[in-house]
Structures are given as C-alpha cells and as structure tokens.
Image: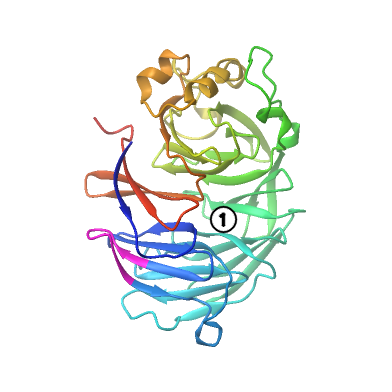
Amino acid sequence: MELRTKYTGGHTDTILCVCANSFKQLATGSENNQVCLWDCAEGKVIHRIRPAGSSQQNSEDDVTSLCFSLTQPHNLYCAVDTAIYLYDTRCDMASPMAKFEYNKEEINQLALHPKDTYLAACDDSGHIRIIDTNQRKLYKTLRRHTNICSSVSFHPKLPWHLASGGLDCSIYTWDFSRGRVFASLSTQDLNFEDESSSVPSSYTVNPPLVHSVSYSNNGDLACGLENSTIHLLDFKKRNDIGVKRTFKGHTQGVSQVIFLGNDLLSAGNDGKIILWNTPSGSSTDERKSNNPNVSDVNKDEASSSASSESTGDSNESTGEAEAAGSSYIRHVLDHGDKVNWICPFQSDDKSLLYVADQTDVVSVYSIMSSGST
C-alpha cells in the first residue's frame, strides 16, 4: 500500500466516515454536522453541506455514517444523530429529497441491500431499523442487542439475510423479512488465550466488544473486536455460528473490517491497516481449505502471536511479515493515527483505499489486491 495523495480543505473537524460511488465521487462526514462531496479526479470539494436541514444549520451533531445508492449512485444517504437524509448529488444539495426519522438514538452505521431495496440503520439503543428505499418507509425493526449495535451488513447472495454486531459482545444473523434471528454468537465465549505467545494483554484484558461486521462476496462474515482480534466465522448449520479463522495483528481495538472482493482489510485504533490472506471459494463448510497458508482455527491461534509481533512499527509487505512467522498478513500499513473509517474502491484498473482518521484530512492509498501483480 502506497500513499497517493491527501484531500485537504474540505472539513474543519475530525472526519468520521467515508464512502465512494461509481461516478468517482467521494463523500466524507465529520463532527459538527458537515458533509463534503469530492471530485476524486481533482481531489477538490464539489459540495459542502450541513445535512440537519435549514432550520438546524447550527446543529453540532456528528455525521456518523454515509452510503451511496448502488443502482442510483448519485443518491447519498447521510446519518446525523437519529435521522437519515437522502440527497441527490447532481443538484446543489441545498435540501434533502427525503428524511427518515425512525431511529430513537444515535445511528452508528448505514448499510444498503445488494439490490438497493433496503437500508439498514443500527443505533445506540441496540435496534436496527430496516427502511424500504422504494416506498421510503419503515419496513421492520430488529430487536435483540442489549447494548449499542455498532455494525450491520447485508448478505451478498441471500436476499433476506443480515448480520449485526454490538457492544453487548454479540453477533446475530437475521431473517430480516420476519424479524427473526437465525443464529447468534457471544464473543465472550471465544478462547483468546495463546499459551505459546509472549505477546501480552490486549487479547485477554480488553473485552471482546464487536465494533465491525462485514460480508465478503462469497458470503464469509468477518468481525473486528475491541480486544484486537478478527474472526472469520463459519456457518456450520443454519442456526450455528463457529469461528473458522482467527487473525491477530493489531495491538489495539479493531475499528473496522471490510472486504474488497474477497480480500479482507482491517483498521485499528493502533493506527495500522492490514491486508489479510483469507481462504478462497464459497462460504460455509463446503470449503475445507487445502491452502498451506491457511490453517484451522486451533493452528491459527498458535501462529497468530507471530502475526501480532510482525506488525510492530513496520509498514513492509508480505515477505517480511511471513519471514517473521505470519502466514496470514499480506501487508501492514502503519498509517499512524487512529483510524475512524476505511473505504476500498476499485477505480478503472486501480484499487484505492480512502482513510479517515482523527484529523480533517482524507488519505488515499493504492492497494494491491490478490488479483494484482
């Protein structure tokens, strides 16, 4: 991963979230109720707005999540406090096309259904509101988390499936059409100790709060935890979630996991961004890996301490990480600042990564996916 450029001059406060569309536009949201729309070709701001509406222009609520429509990339959803605003970026964005006020507490993440038909919004109450984007009304409310629901992700192939994670140390998979849980996993039940490791603390001292969940194109589900671990989950049965792989490379909480195709990226409070080797092929136990670089979860636990040590202050690529004993880390980027949000994006023949941290600047990196040479 190499730094290509930085976008400056858009925000005056910390950028919290980032998303990109197929029109080569980037949207960024920050503290104090500000959204910027950027021209990625020029790195310049096209629009700068305060989504809370003309009657609340002085609102200091944070913009906590953004997402572009998949079928109409000019449509941008913005989450501010408990409300969601829909804008048409082809216009001056002076006022929203629609406003959704179904959440009762601050929204943490927005996620769009692969067919663009539903929008999920999870919030601090632990509830997940599912909005019908065609009829622009509430479709369903999912209630099971007992603490903040921090992250939500739709399954890429199963049309009624959704996953969520929260600060109650729980991961749920849902049939959101019925509002029912398919399966659940308590991360407190996972074994994080590695007797062979001399690396201290974070795996066992910090609670395994779930900060982020993300589906790959294959339907693999990854989760990033406060105790600095990442888990690739295995759906052995419809109602049974197990851990298929455990990845250890961060030294502080994992703020985000996200797939670029089937490549897994993670960002942490340690300021590191890691590109991981993951199994290829379809999800669940129809795939039993023969890849020598990917072992079962027990062997993974034994070798993962080397992954953690290999990150150090290094931003070197695969070769040195593997030489240090890690067969999982492909590349470690030492970004430096605590990462708030990452957004991988395929532009022409280039894979880019947009990074928001504790500053008002967006960093743009080029990344090498598994299909790159």
Q: Quadrant of residue 88?
A: bottom left
Q: Residues within 10 Å of mark 1 (few under 14, many from 20)?
A: some
Percent x, y for residue 47? Answer: 34, 73
Q: Nearer the viewer, residue 189 or 78?
A: 78
Counting labels gives 1
The residue shown at (50%, 86%) is 54
Q: Quadrant of residue 102?
A: bottom right
**Amino acid type at mark 1:** Trp
Residue numbers of the magenta segment: 37-46
Q: Quarter-wise, where is residue 91 in the image? A: bottom left
Residue 223: image location, x then y, percent: 58, 40
For residue 137, above or below residue 245: below
* Residue 270 locus on image (x, y percent): 54, 37
- Colouring of the image: rainbow
Query: Which x, y percent locates residue 84?
Result: 54, 72
- Horizontal side of 271 relative to 23 (left or right) equals right
Q: Which residue is mark 1?
A: 160
Q: Is the magenta region chiefly helix, strand or loop?
A: strand
From the viewer's perspective, tell me whether residue 188 is left or right of residue 109. Answer: right
